[in-house]
């Protein structure tokens, strides 16, 4: 099954893993220790994030370390930008309307 970034960030646990890895690289056990779910469940979330390219996993000796890859989140930013533009235009129009109404009432 091919996964995409949107599927990956849809889950709150995966979003929390990304946030956790945003500031530091952690080994798999350190990531799993931060959650009250089973290690296999954490491993599944890690695998999904890696498949989507949101994290990278590097082997260092016997340890595997996870690191966030924020370049893939650009897809989400680009998608959200179209809605940001839409709502900014709508809110600007509302502001103009309210300003005109206020000016009309003051006259």
Image: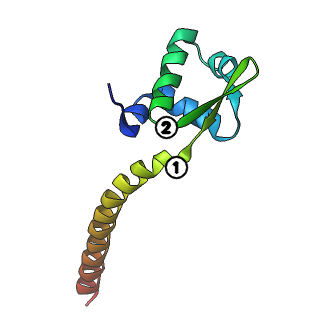
Q: Position of residue 20 (x, y in %)?
A: 63, 33
Location of residue 21 with respect to 100 vertically, above or below: above
Q: Quadrant of residue 37?
A: top right
Q: Nearer the viewer, residue 67 or 36?
A: 67
Q: Position of residue 71 (x, y in %)?
A: 52, 49
Q: Nearer the viewer, residue 22 or 104?
A: 22
Q: Position of residue 5 (x, y in %)?
A: 40, 39
Residue position for label 1 = 71
Say few, some or many: other residues with alpha carbon within 10 Å of mark 2 (under 14 / 14 to 19 / 20 or more): many
Q: Nearer the viewer, residue 14 or 47?
A: 47
Location of residue 39 with respect to 18 vertically, above or below: above
**Residue drawn at the location 50% of the way across and 25% of the way down:** 13
Q: Position of residue 49 (x, y in %)?
A: 49, 30
| Mark 1 and mark 2 residues within 8 Å of each other at the beta carbon | yes
Marks 1 and 2, how far apart at CA: 9 Å
SS category of the residue bearing label 2: loop
In the image as oriented, which residue stretches furthest toward the bottom? 107
Residue position for label 2 = 53
Q: For the C terminus, which image quadrant?
A: bottom left
Left/right of residue 37 with respect to residue 12 in the rendered view = right
**Residue drawn at the location 28% of the way across and 85% of the way down:** 103
In the rendered structure, which disc, 1 or 2, sits on the residue that comes first in sequence? 2
């Amino acid at each position: 099954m091919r996964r995409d970034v949107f599927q990956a960030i849809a889950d709150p646990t995966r979003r929390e893993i990304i946030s956790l890895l945003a500031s530091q690289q952690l080994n798999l056990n350190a990531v799993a220790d931060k959650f009250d779910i089973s290690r296999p469940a954490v491993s599944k979330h890690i695998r999904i994030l890696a498949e989507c390219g949101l994290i990278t996993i590097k082997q260092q000796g016997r340890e595997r370390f996870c690191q966030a890859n924020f370049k893939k989140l650009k897809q989400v930013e680009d998608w959200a930008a179209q809605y940001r533009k839409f709502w900014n235009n709508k809110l600007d129009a509302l502001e103009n309307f309210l300003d005109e109404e206020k000016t009309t009432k003051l006259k």
